[in-house]
Amino acid sequence: MTRALPGQELSLKLKERFPSAVQSWRGDSIWIDPASIRDVCCFLKEDKDLDFNFLNSVSAVDYIDHFELVYHLTSLNLNHSAVVKAKVYGRENPTVPSVYEVWQGADFQEREVYDLMGVAFEGHPNLKRIMLWDGFPGHPHRKDFEDVVKY
Amino acid sequence: MAIRAEPVVVNIGPQHPSTHGVMRLRVSFDGEIIVDVEPVFGYLHRGSEKLAEERNYVQALTLTDRLDYVASMTNNQAYCLAVERLLGVEVPERAQYLRVIAAELQRIASHMVAIGFFLQDLGALATPLMYCFRIRENILDMFEMLCGARITVSYMRPGGVYADAPEEFWPALDKFIANTPHLFDDLEKLIVENEIVLVRTKGTGVLKLESAIAGSISGPVLRGSGLPWDWRRADPYDIYQRVQFDIPVGQRGDNYDRFQVRLEEIKQSLRIVQQCREQIQPGLARAELPFILRPPAGAEAYGRVESPKGELAFYMVSDGSVAPYRCKVRSPSLINLTVLKELLLGSKLADMIVTLGSIDINMGEVDR
């Protein structure tokens, strides 16, 4: 059984290293300051007790006043998992650091989030639309997206 | 003096049989050698995740059939697991067994398609494919008995399955368990020691284990690179902890290993189906749930299965209404393509088609 690391345990561990980066925790999730997400992810991967070498998925949820990025992580060696989240404010040009340098598997997933949700990833080597064509107006997975074509 | 030429850019697809759907590969060649690859997606993008936000939880299930349409059962299963975790409901035991039987049959069917078209890509036109489809056809007939549909099944529902298996299903399943090893032997004899298959697949498209893990690769591609990681074993769902099965792995991570892993997995799936057939007991096929489901507001769940392509998961967020607030699909086909560039750089045009076939993608799932 994959053990879900409780958010409390993980936040205590992270606070030693990044005192200001951990914002809160609830259940299995912890919230990280989006500006330090790459550093935290790098630590999560490199630390021997955590050893999160596998990035399951990168998702984004639109909560109207902010976007929430959700990183599901697993350690294939220790068989435990964690959910790391980051709240990103602003609808005009939300930007977070890319975790591509940490896990190359983030490549297409971050491009998808950028394309459909409009959150840009700083440091991504090839950040452009993946499903839709260049010049498509808006980002369809946002809650306030209105289709330009009326049916 | 060596002659240097400008790289030639060739578009493979979007309408090309070996791209397994509508995908375009923009490939730069130096002579016959690939120097750059850029996959271009989106030709089949239907916005399934957005569509799910406008449907109730049972209606949105039908969208999952159309993601990976070669393996609808496992898509249903991942979605149902996510919704059940949102609701916090228990699934009756018989329903779990029926799910595992259906999912493992689906795995066999999907791997048969993967292997058949892989050989087709190698140039073995039609004959091996028909051997594969002979087995798949029996499975689709059984799905028709279970739910009336062959491809877009919608058989599993939150809380169980749509209905208990009809009487005629069990004799058909027994016959399938008895007959398939022979049909499978025929196929193996035809292909496994075939000189052309060995020469074309061994040593081509090598994926190192470190790049596979860093690239979030899952499923037979990861196992082909040598890591015995299977979510059915690592994080068992439904009744997988009660059945015995082995996890086949490759050694070198080349096209041959991925192909061999799929062949072995079919045998293991048959083993699982057989054990489920022996263990299944009478009982309810579906938990008592209201027709309109309303998970608590703020609940979220990550429902994950080992689909034939890899780790398929649904990340669902509820706001307390009848429709999901967010329904994100973690699609193995898309993410497995992350390493495509690494696999192809430096190889030849002819190997490109084979390598792409060995990853086993499905465009319905890549584009969603």
Image (tube, coloured by chain):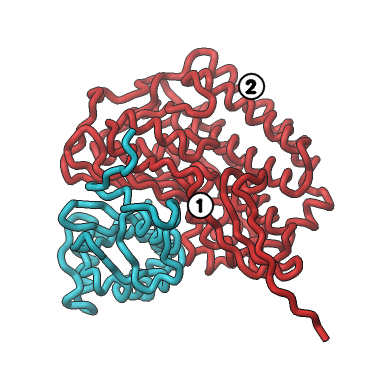
Chain colours: A cyan, B red
User: How far across and down, in percent of the image, does residue B26 sit?
Assistant: 60, 60
Quarter holding residue B56: top left
Q: Nearer the viewer, residue B117 or B108?
A: B117
Quarter holding residue A39: bottom left
For mark 2, what is the residue? B175
- Note whether residue A29 is visible: yes
* Mark closest to the chain's N terminus, 1 or 2: 1
Judged left or right of residue B211, residue B293 is left
Q: Residue furthest top?
A: B167
User: How far across and down, in percent of the image, does residue A30 sit?
Assistant: 22, 62
Q: Quadrant of the C terminus of chain B?
A: top left
For mark 1, what is the residue? B41
Judged left or right of residue B52, residue A66 is left
SS at circle 1: loop
- Note whether residue B251 is visible: no
Indicate the amino acid at tag 1.
Answer: Phe
Q: Nearer the viewer, residue A87 or B26?
A: B26
Q: Residue furthest bottom?
A: B1
Q: Residues within 10 Å of mark 1 (few under 14, many from 20)?
A: many
Q: Residue at x 35, y 35 (%)?
A: B80
Quarter holding residue B2: bottom right
User: How far across and down, in percent of the image, does residue B46 sit?
Assistant: 42, 41
